[in-house]
Image: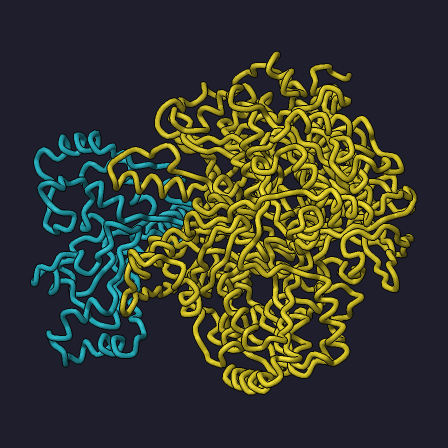
Chain colours: A yellow, B cyan
Amino acid sequence: MSSVNKEPESHNPYWRSVNELEGTPEFQRYVEREFPYLDEETATGSVNRRQFLQLMSASMALGGLTACRRPVNHIVPYVRPPEDVIPGVPLYYATTMPFGEEAFGLVVESHEGRPTKIEGNPDHPATLGKSSMQVQASILGLYDPNRSPRTLRGGQPAEWKDFAEALTSLTSGLGETGGDGLAVLSEATSSPTVARLKRAIEQKYPKLRWVAYEALGSENAHEGTALATGTSLRPLPHFDKADTILALDADFLMTEENAIRNSYDFANRRDPDMPANKSTMNRLYVAEPAYTVTGGMADHRLRLKASRIAAVAVAVAKALGVNGVTDLEAPAGELDPVWIENAVEDLRRAGSHGLVVAGRRQPAAVHALVAAINHRLGSIGTAVTYVEPLDTIRSDMKALRDLTADMADKKISTLFILGGNPVYNAPADLDFGKALGEVGFTAHLSELYDATSERCLWHISRTNFLESWGDARALDGTLSLVQPLIAPLHADSHSDLTILNLIATGEEATAHDLVRESWAERFDGAVGFETNWKRLLHDGVLKNSSYRPAQVTISADGIRQAVTTLDLTTNEEAIEVVFGPSTALHDGRFANNGWLQEVPDPITKITWDNAAIVSPTTARKLGAMRKLNKLGELKFDMIDISIGGASLALALYIQPGHADNCISLALGYGRPEAEAVLSVGHGVGFNTYLLRTTDAAHIVPSVEVRKSIGTYELAITQDHHSMEGRPLVREAELTAFKENGKLYPEAHYHEPHQLWEPPVDYSKGYQWGMTIDLNRCTGCSACTIACQSENNIPVIGKTQVGKGREMHWIRVDRYYKGPIEDPQGVVMQPVPCQHCENAPCEQVCPVTATTHDHEGLNTMVYNRCIGTRYCSNNCPYKVRRFNFFNYTKDIPETVQMAMNPDVTVRFRGVMEKCTYCTQRINQARITSKVDGREIRAGDVQTACQQACPVNAISFGNINNEKERVTALKRNPRNYQILQEINTRPRTSYLGRMRNSNEHLAPDDSAANGHEGH
Amino acid sequence: MAGLLTVGFIWYYGSPEYTDVGYQPVQPVPFSHKMHVGDLGMDCRYCHNFVDQSHEANVPPTQTCMNCHQLVLPESEQLAPIRQSWQSGKPMEWIRVHKIPDYAYFDHSVHLAAGVGCASCHDRVDQMEVVTLKKSLSMGWCLDCHRDPTPHLRDLTATSVTDMEWQPGENQLAFAKEIMEKKNINPRTDCSACHR
């Protein structure tokens, strides 16, 4: 198979893994095996053929007899039908997912009162109808079977009313002392009702200590703006107005705040097809230690230790003439002066459309410099605004440190922990768990009985956001309501609002009443509260409620002072550690979510784990390498990292393009809870919080590292479904492309001989097609999870993923380009079923379980499939997925509630793959027929398309001129992958464009039109 | 010969025509469609009221029964389970008669819009004392109509989908061809039409 139609490899500068680049014999053997994922154990297992037949004939005989009885199937109608519910027709409600200081406006699909699918709310500024993988996966959080069902006291079942009594008697005693010794530890929040109740509590107990803590808070940005402007402000970048962007260790497209909106705006400004008079495609400079999806989108990327980012900020500020920096000496050490010079030149040219952003782990002074640079560029008010958040309780790690110290000193007698899991994710030097033991009365409100719950006297089950009332402000201030979709799954679970009100007033009230109370004064009296309230519930957002931009004046003294706090010295040889969020689990709050555990990290492609990420050079220096064994299992060496007194051994993973002498550690793994309370997340990955301290919570400039004994297995999907070096991703330099219209690497396409009868006529009727714009795709994987949610795709676990059996219908391939040490680019390519008009899979199915329909869909008929897997073998795109086991057999009842009733749940031994969301096509067809019209442009959206925050995916009837996809199919960037084998895929791709600065070394000779070979 | 017999045996006795047709389970309440529809003349959609809006022809909630039976036969012993359900809030558990497999997705609303009457698939329910499965509901049976729907399409301006006594007229073929053109009725026979 490997010799047919294979392009000479020298034509293709792209590669996916170190193994592929090096072409190790193990790798060759692995990809050339007929069934790379066939476990040798099963192939030569203990049951031989004869035994198998004996067993099977016996069970067939028995099975035949039992099948004679007709199963009785019941219909259970309502007793009193709820208003508005038509059985079989879903309803959609607007709600909001609070996420720290952020809030995502959503529209949730509900089947007979059972929420099944989450989408963004088109009217909400943080989502604009789009979503992220966390937003998509949060539906599974609602149905988490490990959710705590009830109130516990000391781990034993207890009554809520006893807790309420204990609370009121305790707090009434505290009233005399003004609340001395009373503390609340919450998550960051932007809920106006929480803010109102906080004010009420503070009035009653003036000495109350209220601390909010997030492991990944926004402290640095706020402190930075306070240094620069004198006021603590929140920067709000507007990527739709930025021509040139410099991102300093800021993954603004994925793991930083407001990523959905940022991606949406960024991609719209990155459209090469924009009319020239309107604007030009933006240019992105990124300086960062580890490859992120933002780095992957960069036109110019500088790999740099995180501790050296500050020096870049100073150099840029100095070059732009920022007051307070100009008279400083240039920062010491090696920095790429040409890179910085050109970035600065571009920023200066962009002026008010130039934008600099810094990531949350960079110190406050860098954020101060960024504010000053933006001010100097004149972009404050255009490409970025600064706002003063209202109703927002921000995370404050220093306050947590002080609180913990007071707890340890027994100065705190009563502590309410509302959400969060500080025993797990507070910096290790605080030893929060121990300090908790010194507090007399502790209560933890939480959805799971987690590590913090275990150490508190009381545990209260918390309602999910899909079960309770609430409200929240988006980062830009827009107000929206949290509207429940379902009554709490566990009757004894409670909202944080109820508890806060209990502290404030001693009385029990429902979250619904409390939210309404907060909103009573917000509406004007003209139309009355109820009308306003209902409109708000319907829309999901309160229009025109965003913040007004703050006036920003930059203090030169502030900047000067800020810079003095920076350590600009350099020790290139010291190995630093940087902490960052997990791309899937964030700070660990999603650890029990199977979808998010199993989604491959966009860059490393690791599933079900985190690892110490280093560059190839650093790995060599540490003497640690990876090994690929004959089954394609990757064994990784372990390293020991010591910081202060703590040390941790974890797997080392090599990432091309990572900064040298730097180790990236993702937070959020290695949750300490037992399997009984964390069945999915238990024992997954390494708990990097153990290495984190308050003083060095983000960047540790120098650590001790040595190779450890033993190896570790990681389940990595990057070598799975390999298409063996063919030119699948194509790109071009924008200016060159406008002249010659060529994408590189060029495909060598010959009109093939037609083996079968002339092609079917697809010129009439609905013909479905898709385009995926590689120039927009960041690789964020929201599509993968949206598809999983829509199409009932099972979670299979680390072992199975390690064998290459992952079930995702749309995978995102990540290609590096260039040398292993410093790849000159990353290209992301989502690959769903290509729906070939000449589908190779259809030709080999012995039972015609996969056939073509008249609308161009390559259909998969589950009830016909007998599981030969010939189709998968013959699929050149490797998009078919096989149910090796009955993955859906044991899923808990609550998780079954998350299933989409419009899609068949597949059984063991059945092949499955992307269907172009055929259920959505059929629904649109039925609606149109009942209404007596044609399906209109835009009527059908696939789940991946709907979720995609950058609008990279277009789908529709390619015979309809009004569809966006039809226009894009004619775009000169449009190409099909493996066109040369004449499969005539319905999914096509739009080539990636680069907008390089001509003065910087071109990223790639091929992309500029000079074939390198 | 033996092989032929075996094939013939399975062909006949294994087909839904033999195994399924005639299924007539005992329901928790002996609801008589004959009396309600045939004798009293109630429209199907008094109870199955969302059939033209949803893929499913909803079985009525207990409340629909109680609309009348609070006043009509309020003491009837046969209706005791209905009253019990009404008082306790515990739903009725009817036994499904017309069942297609989970991997096949049938939509009532679109068939009604095309002019296919209830009786085409459910037969003369107005004459059934106990609801009985009269058609095989097999895939071949579905396809028969999808390949040639002309005998089953009615003129909705002249009659209703719920009219149990409708018979194709003399010019049925001409009418059906005309309405198929007009309403763009082109039933699909692709797998993806019903299987998702």
Q: Is residue A321 left or right of residue A860?
A: right
Dividing the image into 4 quarters, which one contains the N terminus of chain A?
top right
Q: Quadrant of the C terminus of chain A?
A: top right
The quadrant holding residue A415 is: bottom right
Residue A593 vs residue A427, the one in the foreground? A427
Residue A966, position in %: x, y?
44, 25
The percent coordinates of residue B91 (x first, y second) are 31, 71
Whether residue A781 is visible, yes or no, is no
- Above or below residue A978? Residue A519 is below
Q: Position of residue A300 (x, y in %)?
A: 72, 30
Q: Is residue B156 left or right of residue B146?
A: left
Residue placed farthest to the top in the image? A739
In the image, residue A246 above or below residue A883: above
Q: Is residue A404 left or right of residue A895?
A: right
Q: Residue at x 90, y 53 (%)?
A: A705
* Residue at (79% x, 47% y) in the render: A561
Decide which of A190, A494 is in the foreground and name it.
A190
| Residue A563 % position (x, y) | 80, 45
Task: Pick whichever, A122 or A362, lies toward us.
Answer: A362
Q: Is residue B178 left or right of residue A797?
A: left
Q: How many marks?
A: 0
The residue drawn where x is 88% and y is 34% is A334
Residue A404 at least partly seen: yes
